[in-house]
């Protein structure tokens, strides 16, 4: 009997493997597809690879400002995919070699929990094998959802996973249905690599997420439009058809558009439809019910990541995996805590956030003051020709303790951790302001953004 059976090797499963091996546990791993799961092969990592390429293409257009005359003759998405596959292949192979070196068995197939300590594996050839473990961790992730009768077919209507893993050539025209995170990220990538992109969003703004302010959404739409992306808000697809190898879409406003491909990006659902036959409790949307310790209604079966009703973020899955392993094998138990949870989006510019926005704070009855500073006057951003963006910090009006931070611009995903640490330590505007920052750096923008609150207004 294994100490632990891990079903799925995405961010949650991967982190569970790393933690369990360090604890010298005897583990078994089950993966139905490729090691690394959706994040490594079809989502987070390939998205950031293509986005890095897109940002590089944009940067090349500014080369003359550095005194370099560069003519970009050819932008090849096909070559980008080839090198993306090689990079991801290296990471996947590294994990495989680690597991082999630790003599950890990897069962290729679909795992189903058939008993409190039993997992049945259905292999590619249809054969089945049952293994046993003291503990079981469910980390099977999520799958794309569809909407309004629009069904992915892998050719004309594709998912985000199709785009990241299987698309060989960028289409001349692409219609993105959904202006959320994935839609905005892929819309920007496709546009930069040469596609004429239209984004259709049923709500009144891009990134219609409570933790993203209207200020950020408006800035993103402005930059997207500037790059030639057609953004249709308050709009949805009434019907569509495939005619002469093109997709023809009729929109709710009566207009009609034609695209080579349609990207369906309207969210994801937990991959739990056939995970067990023993009665693991789920909610009406299919999320596995867990307590604060990530334990299911079976005391030895835990779950983490997208199968749990928590933020669908790779780093949340990793964090939950660490918590779950601690609660399985360590005497001191730990409750999951999302109070300080930074996240980032990689589209026409980076967007990062932690904590509360002004509106969220007001909804909680908290009076706030804010600090703001644009990238325009940050010397490092100017040196990098990346002066598009800003920082907005939210503080409690009375205590001046930080409540939240939004960073829009270059390296937002990196410097947001400075504010995540400040939030974790309940730092005040004065404490953030009084820290000595290296100059020139992007991080010193936090010194600038705290001036008004910590010292006083200049104007």
Image: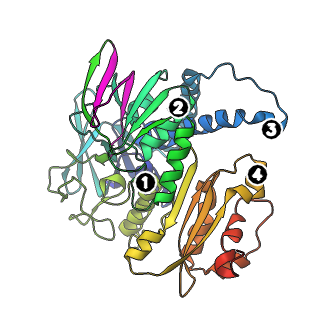
Main SS, magenta residues: strand
Which residue in the structure is indicated by mark 4? Answer: 382
| Left or right for 128, reference 156 | left
Residue 258 is a magenta residue = yes
> From which residue to which does the magenta span run?
245-267
Which residue in the structure is indicated by mark 2? Answer: 191
Mark 1 secondary-structure assignment: loop
Residue 194: x and y in percent read 55, 25
Residue 261 occupies which quadrant of the picture? top left
Q: Decide: marks 4, 2 in contact (CB < 8 A)?
A: no
**Among the two numbered marks 4 and 1 on one chain, the one whose residue lies closer to the N terminus:** 1
Asked whether 234 or 28 is in front, the reply is 234
Quote the CA–CA distance across marks 4 and 2. 25 Å
Quote the CA–CA distance across marks 3 and 2. 23 Å
Q: Is residue 332 at all visible to an observer of this figure?
A: no
Mark 3 is surrounded, within 10 Å at the Cα level, by few (under 14), some (14 to 19) or many (20 or more) other residues, namely: few
**Among the two numbered marks 3 and 2 on one chain, the one whose residue lies closer to the N terminus:** 3
Which residue in the structure is indicated by mark 3? Answer: 65
Residue that sits furthest to the right in the current view: 67
């Amino acid at each position: 009997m294994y100490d632990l059976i891990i079903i799925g090797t995405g961010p949650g499963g991967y982190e569970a493997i790393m933690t369990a091996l360090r604890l010298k546990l005897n583990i078994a791993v089950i993966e139905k597809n490729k090691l690394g799961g959706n994040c490594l092969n079809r989502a987070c990592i390939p998205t950031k690879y293509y986005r890095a390429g897109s940002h590089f293409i944009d940067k090349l257009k500014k080369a003359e400002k550095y005194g370099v005359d560069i003519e970009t003759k050819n932008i090849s998405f096909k070559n980008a995919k080839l090198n993306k596959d090689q990079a991801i292949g290296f990471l996947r192979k590294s994990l495989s070699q680690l597991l082999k070196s630790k003599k950890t068995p990897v069962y290729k197939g679909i795992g189903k929990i058939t008993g409190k300590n039993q997992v049945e594996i259905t292999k590619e050839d249809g054969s089945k094998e049952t293994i046993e473990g003291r503990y079981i961790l469910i980390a099977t992730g999520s799958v794309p959802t569809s909407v309004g009768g629009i069904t992915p077919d892998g050719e004309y209507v594709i998912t985000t996973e199709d785009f990241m893993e299987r698309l060989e050539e960028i289409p001349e025209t692409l219609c993105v249905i959904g202006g959320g995170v994935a839609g905005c990220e892929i819309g920007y990538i496709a546009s930069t690599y040469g596609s004429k992109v239209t984004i259709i969003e049923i709500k009144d703004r891009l990134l219609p997420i409570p933790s993203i302010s209207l200020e950020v959404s408006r800035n993103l739409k402005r930059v997207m439009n500037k790059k030639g992306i057609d953004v249709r808000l308050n709009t949805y697809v009434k019907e569509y058809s495939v005619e002469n190898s093109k997709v023809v879409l009729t929109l709710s406003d009566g207009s009609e558009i034609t695209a080579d491909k349609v990207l369906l990006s309207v969210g994801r659902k937990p991959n739990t439809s056939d995970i067990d036959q023993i009665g693991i409790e789920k909610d009406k949307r299919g999320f596995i019910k867990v307590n604060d310790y990530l334990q299911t209604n079976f005391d030895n079966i835990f779950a983490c990541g997208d199968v749990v009703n928590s933020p669908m973020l790779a780093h949340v899955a990793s964090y939950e995996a660490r918590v779950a392993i601690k609660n399985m094998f360590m005497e001191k138990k730990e409750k999951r805590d999302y109070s300080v949870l930074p996240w980032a989006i990689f589209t026409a510019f980076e967007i990062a956030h932690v904590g509360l926005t002004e509106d969220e704070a007001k909804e909680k009855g908290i009076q706030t003051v804010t600090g703001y500073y644009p990238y325009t006057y940050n010397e490092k951003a100017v040196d990098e020709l990346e002066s598009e963006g800003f920082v907005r910090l939210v503080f409690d009006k009375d205590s001046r303790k930080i409540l939240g931070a939004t960073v829009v611009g270059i390296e937002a995903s990196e410097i947001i951790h400075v504010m995540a640490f400040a939030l974790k330590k309940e730092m005040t505007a004065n404490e953030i302001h009084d820290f000595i920052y290296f100059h020139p750096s992007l991080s010193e923008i936090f010194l600038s953004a705290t001036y008004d609150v910590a010292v006083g207004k200049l104007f």
